[in-house]
Image: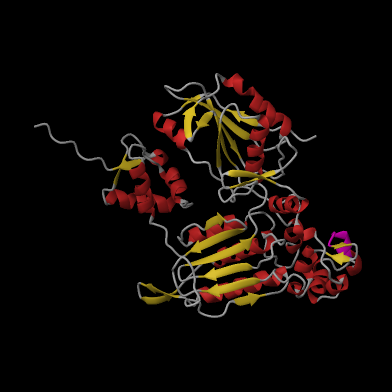
């Protein structure tokens, strides 16, 4: 039996006066919905379903709207909202928590309830038995099996890698890629039955995963599974035909070769880009491991049900990797470094069995990317999500110095001194000695001072305080 949802409630909070009006005027968007406390449970369940099935969101209950004018009209007490919590417990068998908090406001009547929902791994249906998705400020029902299937693929409930392809399975069994893999990794296996055992052959047909992993040329039957590489000689936001240095390269082959060839070409192109350095023109430098991990992630985690290639766009100051498909399940740009979910688990698992695999199968791809960029003192990658794709941008922009980052933090909180450990966390710097030397340089430049009474590892630093004016 599925677990009941965990609804985490907090004590009633008093809303700061400056936020009272903002709640009344907050716009309803893809991520925010505002409802009166009298809302019918069925209608409320549609909003919860839509948020959970799309990108998560915030539901504010207790704001009444009449003739485009909103007023605070909250619950008399916490118990008055029990119907909402009962609805959540009965209808939504979620493992993920729904965070709930009540707010009171001076001069306003009743409590406003705010529910925060994360994107879930499974499909959530409303009380009418339908699943909803959020589009702009509206909740749209899934009305047919094709839409439901696409939602399952988007969320990772099912994977297109298990779909069969109209191709002779013999073309896989006799491929050079498959033969080399079997000989190197499972030499005692029967080539004719191994695909069936791995669920890569179904009813005599190869699956999408089988084609991508073991076909010498999967693009013959999966034409939109290639990688396109563009080189734009500009730093503008968009590339144009006039700034395109050469015709886009099309990289094809099995998943293993696709990654290796694309990484090699991307590195070669970026290293040919000149930038002005201290001693004239220099070669641009990105960490190869960062490029490798971003491209590997794009190949193994993309949505192969979407009829599009992976696009790598190389600009004068950045690399953009556009991968078809939204982030699966509960993965978001914000939690991508902490959470793990494989849209294509067979591709991930079996690619890891190749000699010198491009993926280590430990879910550390993006973490490695961030660490590699930071080692070269480059800005963190930017991960964004569009309607049907994920975009990762590697910028060739230097981080501010340790001193600048520490001072920026102290200016934001001048009355909160920091120590070495806190500075390392703020600056994403693992070296204790580097931060200690930065503090010494800042002390010498009279930018900061030690907090009196602190010493050793407990030494804290604050902005240099101005001298008090003499009373004489």
| Image quadrant where one finds the N terminus | top right
Disc count in the image?
0
| Image quadrant where one finds the C terminus | top left
- Give the x, y percent position of residue 297: 64, 61
Q: Could you tell me which residue is drawn at 65 percent across and 58 percent down?
A: 325
Q: Could you tell me which residue is drawn at 73 percent across and 41 percent down?
A: 130
- Give the x, y percent position of residue 217: 75, 75
Work out whether residue 134 or residue 249 is closer to the camera in this orientation and state it.
Answer: 134
- Give the x, y percent position of residue 304: 71, 62
- Give the x, y percent position of residue 368: 58, 58
Q: Quadrant of residue 234?
A: bottom left
Work out whether residue 315 or residue 236 is closer to the camera in this orientation and state it.
Answer: 236
Q: Is residue 32 left or right of residue 53?
A: left
Q: Could you tell me which residue is drawn at 58 percent across and 73 percent down?
A: 229
Q: Quadrant of residue 216?
A: bottom right
Q: Which region shows up in magenta?
A: 194-200
Residue lying at the far left in this picture: please name it: 472
Residue lying at the far front in this picture: please name it: 67
Rendered position, 387 above or below 46: below
Is residue 263 in the magenta section? no
Work out whether residue 379 or residue 158 is closer to the camera in this orientation and state it.
Answer: 158
Q: Is residue 351 left or right of residue 118?
A: right
Q: Is residue 307 left or right of residue 232?
A: right
Q: Is residue 135 left or right of residue 454?
A: right
Q: Quadrant of residue 172?
A: bottom right
Work out whether residue 414 or residue 32 is closer to the camera in this orientation and state it.
Answer: 32
The image's colour scheme reads: secondary structure
């Amino acid at each position: 039996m599925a677990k009941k949802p965990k609804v985490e409630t907090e004590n009633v909070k008093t809303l700061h006066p400056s936020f009272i009006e903002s709640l009344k005027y907050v716009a309803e968007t893809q991520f925010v919905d505002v409802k009166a406390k009298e809302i019918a449970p069925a209608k409320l369940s549609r909003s919860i379903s839509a948020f959970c099935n799309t990108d998560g969101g915030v539901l504010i209950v207790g704001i009444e709207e009449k003739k485009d004018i909103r007023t605070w009209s909250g619950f008399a007490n916490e118990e008055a909202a029990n119907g909402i919590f009962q609805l959540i417990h009965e209808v939504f068998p979620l493992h993920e928590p729904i965070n709930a908090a009540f707010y009171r406001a001076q001069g306003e009547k009743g409590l406003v309830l705010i529910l925060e929902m994360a994107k879930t791994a499974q499909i959530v249906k409303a009380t009418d038995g339908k699943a909803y998705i959020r589009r702009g400020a509206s909740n749209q029902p899934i009305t047919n099996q094709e839409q439901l299937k696409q939602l399952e693929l988007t969320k990772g409930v099912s994977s297109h890698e298990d779909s069969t392809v109209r191709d002779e399975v013999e073309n896989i069994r006799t491929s050079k890629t498959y033969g080399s893999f079997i000989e190197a990794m499972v030499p005692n296996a029967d080539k004719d039955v191994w695909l069936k055992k791995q669920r890569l052959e179904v009813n005599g047909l190869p699956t999408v995963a089988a084609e991508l992993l073991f076909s010498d040329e999967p693009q013959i039957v999966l034409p939109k599974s290639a990688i396109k590489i563009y080189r734009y000689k500009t730093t503008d936001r968009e590339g144009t035909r006039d700034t395109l240095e050469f015709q886009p390269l099309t990289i094809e082959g099995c998943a293993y070769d696709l990654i290796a060839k694309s990484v090699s070409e991307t590195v070669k192109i970026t290293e040919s880009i000149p930038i002005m350095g201290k001693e004239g023109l220099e070669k641009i430098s990105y960490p190869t491991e960062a490029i490798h991990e971003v491209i590997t992630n794009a190949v193994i985690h993309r949505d192969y049900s979407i009829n599009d290639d992976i696009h790598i766009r190389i600009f004068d100051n950045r690399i953009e990797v556009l991968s078809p498909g939204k982030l699966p399940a509960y993965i978001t740009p914000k939690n991508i470094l902490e959470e793990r979910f494989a849209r294509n688990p067979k591709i991930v698992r079996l690619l890891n069995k190749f000699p010198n695999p491009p993926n280590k199968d430990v879910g550390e791809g993006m973490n490695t990317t961030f660490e590699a960029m930071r080692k070269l003192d480059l800005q963190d990658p930017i991960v964004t999500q569009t309607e049907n794709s994920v975009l990762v941008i590697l910028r060739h922009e230097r981080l501010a110095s340790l001193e600048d980052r520490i001072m920026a933090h102290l200016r934001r909180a001048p009355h909160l001194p920091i120590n070495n450990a806190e500075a390392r966390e703020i600056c994403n710097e693992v070296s204790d000695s580097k931060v200690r030397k930065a503090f010494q340089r800042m002390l010498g430049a009279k930018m900061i001072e030690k907090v009196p009474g602190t010493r050793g590892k407990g030494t804290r630093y604050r902005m240099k305080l101005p001298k008090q004016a003499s009373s004489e």
